Image (cartoon, rainbow, N blue to C red):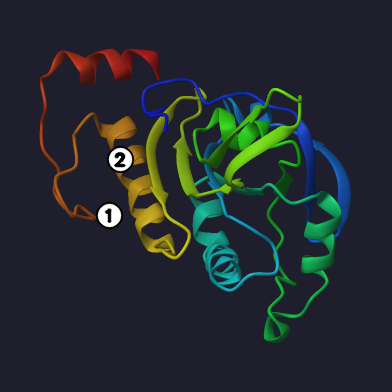
Amino acid sequence: MAVLVGKKAPTFSAIANVNGSDMDVKFSLDQYIGKKHVVFFFYPKDFTFVCPTELHAFQSKLGEFESRNVAVVACSTDTEQSHWGWLQTPKDKGGIQGITYPIVADTDKTISDAFGVLAGEYEYNDEYDLVADGPMIAYRGLFLIDKKGVVQHQVVNNFPLGRSVDEALRMVDALQFFEENGEVCPADWKKGDAALKDTHEGVADYLSMN
């Protein structure tokens, strides 16, 4: 599994469902470079149990992300048609009706693979049959990407383990505080807490690029 922190986020162009209804939108994270921070998260499958709790949790805090000039984008290996069907299904029936942020369709699994969260591997056997080892769906990966397109934080959970949206917001606050003040954030730091001065070369290098 790849560690992308400190590296440029992989680029891609894919179809996404946007605003809960538009199904065939050509989508790329490149549109946010120089403009917004991005929380880009993967989930395993549409029409499952843990996944809708996460998607609705991000939607419930979407205003807080937007107030920080952060775009929230989801992605799974399902098709845009599957996303659309799930978006039309009410929450009380296990659906994600009401989700408005983009949901990318990684149908060919190349985005999940590029971000290092694709569960399983594949190869062709001697008869040239495609043989997959594993489910070939995405783990619960989350990537915080700065305005330069560089990954500053990542976390990857296995399928049964839902993520904390509050922790994602905390990491946004920590990154933006560091970018604005040049002070680093200790363990369990949250917005409004005191931070620490740091004279390490890496901090100066980072600030010079932003």
Residue underneath mark 2: 177
Callout 1 amino acid: Lys
Residue 124: x and y in percent read 68, 26
Residue at 53% x, 65% y: name it.
54
Question: Residue visible at 15% across and 49% down?
Answer: 187
Please say if the residues under marks 2 and 1 sit with CB atoms less than 8 Å apart.
yes
Instruction: Say which quadrant the C terminus sits in.
Output: top left
Q: From the viewer's side, name the closer residue of 132 and 152.
A: 132
Q: Would you place residue 149 above or below residue 196 in this image?
A: above
Most foreground residue, 88 or 204: 88
Q: Nearer the viewer, residue 5 or 167?
A: 5
Q: Earlier in the sequence, mark 2 or mark 1?
A: 2
**Quick one: quadrant of the N terminus?**
top left
* Residue occupying the far bottom of the picture: 92
Say left or right for 130 vs 61. Answer: right
Separation of marks 2 and 1 at Cα, in angstroms: 8 Å
- Which label sits on residue 191? 1
> Can you give x and y, in whole percent of width and height, for residue 194 in the image?
13, 49
Q: Is residue 103 above or below residue 204?
A: below
Say which residue appears at 83% left-offset and 60% top-offset: 84
Secondary element under disc 1, as helix, strand or loop, is loop
